[in-house]
């Protein structure tokens, strides 16, 4: 096992953010994000209204070396202070994942330090333990551009999937709604901003799965309803846009409240006497303030504590990858240099790959 303090370089390249970070964990439990750099590719993908995989992979190649050097410099630890390297090995856009993982392997080989091949979803799942002391088990709502699921996090590498989306991810629904409204890319923050001045009741929208048993989601019907409502309305002025954004966001919040409520009930049944009642929310959509507020109220009702990382650690970042690496190294785990990159890699064994 690698002795503490552990100082790990994290590398994240699974989608459209090139990210490098250095995180240090001390033997007494303190943890420090020494650097956390993100090189956004938004400008390169914006003309296409979404992420273009080949453009993403090329941008990772062009940006990653310098970003890593900057992350090491900002951390102030020097290469000799780095005790391990953690790189996202999937799931994600395979070209980008390969760029980050190969770079991580090169660092591990050159510096003679252990490599941890991190599941990106595990990075999100454990990120709450980087920012707050959160004991296992806890519930996790993981909502990002590619994923929407509710899990019980039982330990490092131990995840029980309680439900997930049957079609689109929540972030994807935000992105598509933004595109339909001409709000640009990425859509989540734009829809949240537009919704602030909107009347959520003006355009009635459906709430798929509401009231159903279990913790599954479905957003494609909602997205289609938004498209039809816009077509019926005709040209959307700023107020109509805001009203539609508000209506869409309100529908999403109702759905998440309902589905997460079922998860809290399930967790309460499973751990009736357990001392920890924590709902964590992670992934890009967890940066949404209205969502955080709705989950906060739900947790109050159920006597749960809501834990959400600060927004920069909710959206894709390398600090969460470094942290997942630390969690694994602490358990004596690392990965060989022939570990493959994986486009699909479900977090919970036997679960669907959403
Ligand atoms: O976790 P993330 O950075 O990348 C993935 O792993 O997918 O999540 C990105 C997603 C995008 O769909 C983006 O629109 C959404 O998270 N997002 C938001 C907000 N900020 C980012 N959705 C709603 N409200 C936000 N404030
Ligand atoms: Zn992500």
Image (cartoon, rainbow, N blue to C red):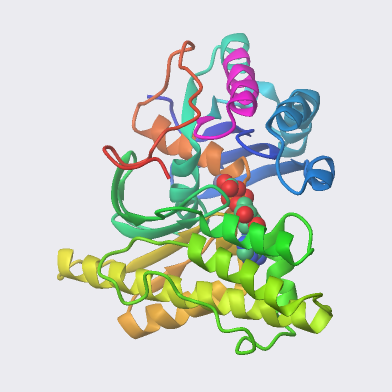
Q: Quadrant of the N terminus?
A: top left
Q: Is residue 62 above or below residue 70?
A: above
Left or right: where does residue 188 sit relative to residue 332?
A: right
Q: Residue at x 60, y 17 (%)?
A: 102
- x, y percentage for residue 85? 56, 26
Left or right: where does residue 64 sit relative to residue 93?
A: right
Principal SS element in the magenta part?
A: helix
Residue 326 lies within the magenta run: no
Q: Quadrant of residue 287?
A: bottom right
- x, y percentage for residue 336? 43, 14
Q: Is residue 249 above or below residue 146?
A: below
The number of discs equals 0
- x, y percentage for residue 91? 50, 34
Left or right: where does residue 299 sit relative to residue 193?
A: left
Q: Is residue 203 above or below residue 320?
A: below
- x, y percentage for residue 329? 42, 30
Q: Quadrant of the C terminus?
A: top left
Residue 94 lies within the magenta run: yes
Residue 29 visible in the current orientation:
no
Give whichever of 193, 175 is nearer the camera: 175
Q: Residue at x 65, y 80 (%)?
A: 246
Left or right: where does residue 10 sit relative to residue 49?
A: left
* Range of magenta residues: 89-106
Residue 216 visible in the current orientation:
yes
Give whichever of 172, 25 is nearer the camera: 172
Give whichever of 281, 80 is nearer the camera: 281
Q: Is residue 321 above or below residue 282?
A: above
């Amino acid at each position: 096992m690698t002795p503490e303090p552990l100082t790990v370089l994290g590398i994240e390249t699974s989608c459209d953010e090139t990210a490098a970070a250095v995180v240090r964990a001390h033997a007494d439990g303190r943890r420090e994000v020494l650097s956390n750099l993100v090189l956004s590719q938004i400008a390169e993908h914006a003309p296409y209204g979404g992420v273009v995989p080949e453009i993403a992979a090329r941008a990772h190649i062009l940006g990653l070396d310098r970003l890593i050097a900057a992350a090491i410099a900002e951390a102030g630890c020097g290469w000799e202070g780095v005790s391990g390297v953690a790189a996202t090995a999937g799931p994600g856009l395979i070209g980008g994942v390969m760029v980050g993982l190969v770079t991580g392997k090169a660092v591990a080989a050159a510096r003679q330090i252990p490599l941890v091949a991190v599941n990106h979803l595990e990075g999100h799942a454990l990120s709450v333990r980087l920012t707050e002391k959160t004991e296992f088990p806890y519930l996790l709502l993981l909502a990002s551009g590619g994923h929407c699921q509710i899990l019980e996090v039982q330990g490092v590498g131990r995840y029980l999937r309680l439900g997930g989306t049957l079609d689109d991810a929540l972030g994807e629904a935000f992105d598509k709604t933004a595109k339909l409204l001409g709000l640009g890319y990425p859509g989540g923050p734009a829809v949240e901003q537009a919704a602030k001045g909107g009347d959520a009741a003006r355009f009635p929208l459906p709430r798929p799965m509401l009231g159903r048993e279990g913790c599954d989601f479905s957003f494609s019907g909602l997205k289609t309803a938004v498209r039809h409502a816009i077509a019926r309305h005709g040209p959307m002025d700023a107020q109509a846009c805001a009203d539609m954004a508000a209506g869409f966001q309100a529908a999403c919040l109702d759905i998440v409240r309902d589905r997460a409520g079922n998860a809290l009930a399930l967790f309460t049944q499973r751990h009736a006497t357990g001392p920890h009642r924590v709902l964590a929310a992670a992934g890009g959509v967890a940066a949404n303030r209205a969502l955080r507020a709705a989950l906060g109220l739900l947790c109050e009702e159920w006597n749960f504590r809501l834990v959400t990382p600060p927004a920069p650690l909710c959206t894709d970042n390398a600090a969460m990858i470094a942290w997942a690496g630390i969690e694994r190294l602490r358990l004596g785990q690392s990965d060989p240099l022939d570990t493959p990159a994986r486009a699909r890699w479900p977090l919970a064994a036997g679960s669907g790959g959403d």
